Amino acid sequence: PGTNLVDVYIRRLRNKIEREPATPRHLLTVRGEGYSFVPPRAVELSDDANLIGRRQALIDLTALVSQHRLVTVVGPPGCGKSSLAAALPNATTVPLGIHRTVLAAAGAVAEALGHPDVYAALDGRTVVLDGVDHLLPELGATVARWLQGTSCRLVLTAQSALGAIGEHLFVLPPLPPEHAMALLRKRTTQRRGAELRPEEVDVLERVAASLD
């Protein structure tokens, strides 16, 4: 087939297998030769202390985001929604907790992604909008316009659903006590630069057991 027809086929394939077809990671162009296929790897799991006990959750969330363009991670305060969403492969996180209006949030998204036009900034990207509870429900209409006007994927973190058409929820439960204890212990050890004393471990165990 002619070059133009090959290009059409390549674009179609990228639209099917790439999360962001405009910046392919698997079906690559090799100048002067043609194309090269790099098979997708398994989810690369971070060893970040914040992801203790969330290995399967990250795998499941990654799969859900690959299938749907609007996903909201919901759960109680402090359960690790932000850390989990931030660990998504090939995603850019934009914290929105300090922005009190949807207009300000839109400006923050454009600035974080490096383009004055929020639609151009979002197009073809996977973006985490972190901490949007205070922007609900007004944010719903804006998110719908962004999805309609671009090819982006949006992941929100909140305590409740956005309520938009096409939204898929990922419910993140609290950590089991043993994982909560491991998380507290690792964070405390990292911050102080020394191992915990036995009496301190006892205190942390009681704290972990009391967490919701």
Image: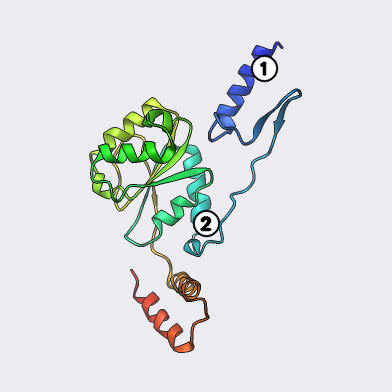
Q: Residue furthest right?
A: 33
Instruction: Name the mark on residue 56.
Output: 2
Name the quadrant containing residue 137: top left
47 to the left or right of 41: left
Q: Which residue is found at the position 51% from the left and 76% from the top?
A: 193
Q: Residue furthest bottom?
A: 199
Q: Which residue is found at the position 47% from the left and 76% from the top?
A: 192
Whether residue 196 is situated above or below residue 115 in the rendered picture: below
Name the residue that disc number 1 marks: 6
Q: Along the line of sight, which residue is nearer the eye, 64 or 28?
A: 28
Q: Position of residue 101 (x, y in %)?
A: 23, 42
66 to the left or right of 164: right
Amino acid type, callout 1 = Val
5 to the left or right of 138: right
Q: Nearer the viewer, mark 2 or mark 1?
A: 1
Q: Which residue is found at the position 59% from the left and 28% from the top?
A: 14
Q: CA distance from mark 2 to mark 1?
A: 39 Å
**The N terminus lies in which quarter of the figure?**
top right
Q: Along the line of sight, which residue is nearer the eye, 108 or 149?
A: 108
